[in-house]
Image (cartoon, rainbow, N blue to C red):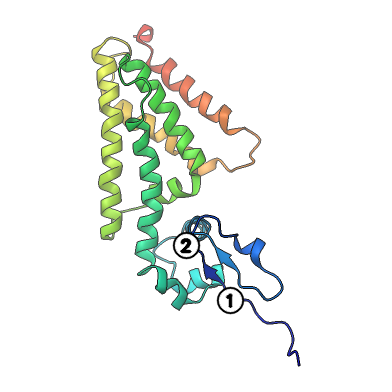
Amino acid sequence: MSTGPTTPQAAVGSDAGVASVGAARGRGRPARYSRDDLLTLVVGVFNERGYEATSMEDLARASGLTKSTFYHHVSGKEQLLGMAVDRALDALSAVFQDDPFASGRPVDRLENAIRRTAEVLLAELPYVTLLLRVRGNTGVERRALTRRRAVDARLAALVTQAADAGEIRRDIDPRLVSRLLFGMVNSISEWYRPGARTPSGDVVWAVVELAMEGLGADRV
């Protein structure tokens, strides 16, 4: 005899093809997450509550998973943070590793780096937002900051090369230029939301235009 509908238990899928929780619920079947779906949910909770203020119990409640299920797959929230910031840093690092202008003029490489950095931020908005809030309080955070400084250094090197080649203005310290460029791009995370009135492509275009016009050698 039936005792009524059962409460579905959530599970984590190890393959990318597993349906998200919203699509899998129903008829008593367990809700399942792909790895990416679960990480995106976790990042959303971290961004909303703050990483330090978020407990594994908060993550379990938000996902419908039990804490024991979480701990079966990860050692704790620090590992989840590492997975999230690595995703952002891998995408940002690829901007400089996969440079179609690698053999071209420094100014072209700089423009491409600015464009791609803005595109990555918009494409990986929750993950980059979390990265930008890392303060170095744990080993994972300190490693993330080290990687982030390496990305900053790559951009600063491009600014210096373009300035030395006379392709952009040389009257502003390249280190200051790189900090201001990243400041402009990173600020997008504070106000842009998917579905906003301004399309993401227009945001990228505006960033590139403002940066390159302001750095033009003819402005000196």
Query: In this rendering, does residue 114 appear at all?
Result: yes
Expressed as whole percent of the image width and height from the top left, the position of residue 40 reads: 51, 55
Expressed as whole percent of the image width and height from the top left, the position of residue 158 reads: 29, 23
Mark 1, residue position: 9
Callout 2: helix, strand or loop?
A: loop
- Say if 212 sits above or below 62 in the image: above
Residue density around tag 2, few if under 14, some if 14–19, many if 20 or more, within 10 Å: few
- Say if 190 sits above or below 212 in the image: below
Whether residue 198 sits left or right of residue 146 in the image: it is: right
Residue density around tag 1, few if under 14, some if 14–19, many if 20 or more, within 10 Å: some
Expressed as whole percent of the image width and height from the top left, the position of residue 84 reads: 41, 54
Which of 13 and 161 lies nearest the eye of the viewer? Answer: 13
The amino acid type of the residue labelled 1 equals Gln
Task: Write the residue at 56% across / 60% down.
Answer: 18
Which part of the image, by quadrant, shows the C terminus? top left
Q: Do the residues labelled 2 and 1 touch (CB within 8 Å)?
A: no
> Which residue sits furthest top?
218
Expressed as whole percent of the image width and height from the top left, the position of residue 137 reads: 28, 59
> Which residue sits furthest bottom?
1
Mark 2, residue position: 14
